[in-house]
Amino acid sequence: MKLLLFVAGLLLPYLPYAQIISGKVSNEKNEPLTGATIADIQNKATVITNNKGEFSIDLSNVPIKKITASHTGFITDTITVEDNKTIHIILKLSPTLESATVSAARSGIFLSNLSAIKTEQITQQELKKSACCDLAGCFETQLTVQPQTTNIVTNSKELRILGLSGVYNQVLVDGLPMIQGLSYTYGISGIPGTLVENIFVAKGANSVIQGFESISGQINVETIKPNHAPKLLLNAYVNSFMEKHLNANYSFKTGKWHSLLAFHTVQPANKTDNDDDRFLDLPLLTRYMLNNKWKYGNDAEWGLSSSIGIRFLNEKRVGGQSGFNAKNDKGSTNVYGQTVNINQPEIWTKTNYRFDDKHNIVLAVSSFHQSQDSYFGTLHYKAKQLSMYANVQHELNYSKHTLKSGISFRHLNIDENIRFTANVPVRTYAGKYLKNENIAGIFSENTMKLLNNKLTWITGVRLDLHNQFNWQFTPRTLVKYDLFPNTIIRGNIGTGWRTVNLFSENINLLASSRNVIIAESLNPEKALNTGLNVVQKFKLKSTDISGSVSIDYYHTRFSNQVFPDYDTDPTRAYIKNFTGKSISNGFQVETALNFYKRVELKAGYNYLDVYQVHGNIKNTLPFNPKHKVLSTISFKPANEKYFIDINAHWFGRQRLPNTSANPEAYRRADLSRDYTVVNAQFTYNFKNVEWYAGCENIFNFRQEKPIISWQDPFSDYFDTSSVWGPTRGREFYTGVRFKIEKKK
């Protein structure tokens, strides 16, 4: 029955629906115009374009099918509309004005009413509200994504959605799978915040076009477009631990091509040990990144357009005991340390050819190679990876439908070597681990609009052939219904699956003394995700007060899950397939208010219930706060000379792995304590310069001595993964942004 519903959605024939006209408004440089007014000249009905310049207007039962497009500082244009045609309106600057300034409210996180998938768009303005040195730090002011530390010694992080491990949400860079396999461990830290233009976050199973993963959600990082970038951007940052960051972006145009050249470096902090456990509070990080992105044409216009990107990343992390010397002490039992050395070149391209308003074809290709040489105490981990991806997609716009179909191919080759320089404690999983994965896929996704454009229904299916696990079927459907103009209800249901990269996705297995017991061959993880959300936007009459309320509920049920068993024996981690009952329930409510374009307030509550059932016993999975509260406040004066941003996070208690079998000195409580973290930042604007200064964790909450058996790091009980809260304490920082805009 489910299959029939999906196929019916894809093949539903054209019916005489109401005439809904969609389109886009831009200026003569093809830059989208936010806040342009589209009006039906007969009924005077109006709509406003979103942040991408997009609009949709109902012209049902209108004899004279003409609309006007207007925007402050531009010449109003009148357009005759053909039936069911997507239109692109280009407005010219008004010659009566010497100059025109287009202004908008300082938007932070944007929710579009037009998108069928509920997607939180985190804008550059929102990213400036915190230090946002890298992608892992870009989620301080939102509730959906939770950055989680996976190894405290090297400060590796993952991004969690719905309380599930970060491996279950798909992280894309410019729509491409550049963070997977080996790059999963440190990849989100290798993208500087100054290179990010927008981050799009969607919960649950969504589009099948980008792949079959996205079990808990999808994070798409959109890097800065060369044609949108300032001519020069310099950003320098230093924190109270004396870690230094420097970023430089330079954009230029040659012929019909726009180019952006970006450089990023991090220089290590001073050695710090505030809790006297003889381990550094943060690793010594050295990073160099060079990125070059080229863009030709505009993919919204007829004809050819293309983007090409190349990037190289070199990174070194050194952590461990304060007396550790990376040159002399790697692999020794005299002093404990961890080192990570990474080199990663990558290249990608997207080429688009739009034949007309109905037909469009897109080719996307990406590839990267990573070599990693790491030491975790006496464990030597050496690995390399080659990843390749290709996707060809055809888009057909007809009647009330948009049909996207195509084929894709993925190649992933991972070669991991694990050896022990001294087998203390005794561990038995040394050896060579090889993975050679080829996945060919075919997909089709149809978007249709019904009921006078109030109902949008997306149905998608994909079929993938895995060289080891044979055919895998992935169906998904999403529905959006406009109950009222500002009341949107969305629902989605779909499956997802993924294969396991054991060590790169569970780096704490290498960083602890646990012996890893792989009990059986690991099958693909599979899950069904169901979600429902309601968004209500409002604006109080006769005032400049606006806001929104959002309520979400998502349920994820795994049919197979590979989650390391840390509870049975604190000196071992058992790895096997779990086909029993494994559930994640996530509920979130969030409200946002904007007062007179001066004050922004936001408050949200998140509830997570993530567990497995063994026999008749419900086991809550560790490191998930069941309750979390976020509140933020932002203020700017009328002259916008400065900004003040404050956010506060409260985390409820979390279950911790069972350590009752350890000697008493190495035991931990079954539950963490609840805690609050408050961050604040002040930004002042000069002509071409922004100076910012802030403090993270103002009240200096810190999990003391988070490492189990820090007294003896070569014992059977040494474990760096038992981290549930901040470990470095209060952190001050300051920075400067210098920007030169392009000449108009």
Image (cartoon, rainbow, N blue to C red):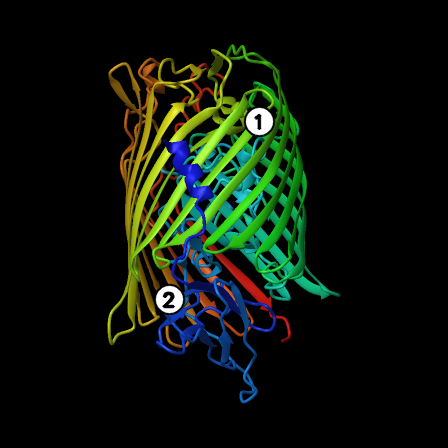
Q: Is residue 616 visible?
A: yes
Element carrying mark 1: strand
Q: Is residue 668 above or below residue 99?
A: above
Q: Which circle, 2 or 1, is nearer the viewer?
A: 2
**Residue behind mark 1:** 465
Q: Is residue 270 visible?
A: no
Q: Amino acid at mark 2?
A: Ser
Q: CA distance from mark 2 to mark 1?
A: 45 Å
Q: Residues within 10 Å of mark 1 (few under 14, many from 20)?
A: some
Element carrying mark 2: loop
269 left or right, relative to 254: left
**Residue behind mark 2:** 60
x, y percent for residue 48:
40, 69
Q: Residue at x 64, y 35 (%)?
A: 342
Q: Quadrant of residue 741?
A: bottom right
Toward the bottom, the furthest residue is 96
Q: Quadrant of residue 274?
A: top left
Q: Is residue 592 above or below residue 422?
A: below
Q: Which mark is residue 101?
A: none
x, y percent for residue 218:
46, 42
639 left or right, relative to 699: right
652 left or right, relative to 276: left
Toward the right, the furthest residue is 255
x, y percent for residue 460:
46, 40
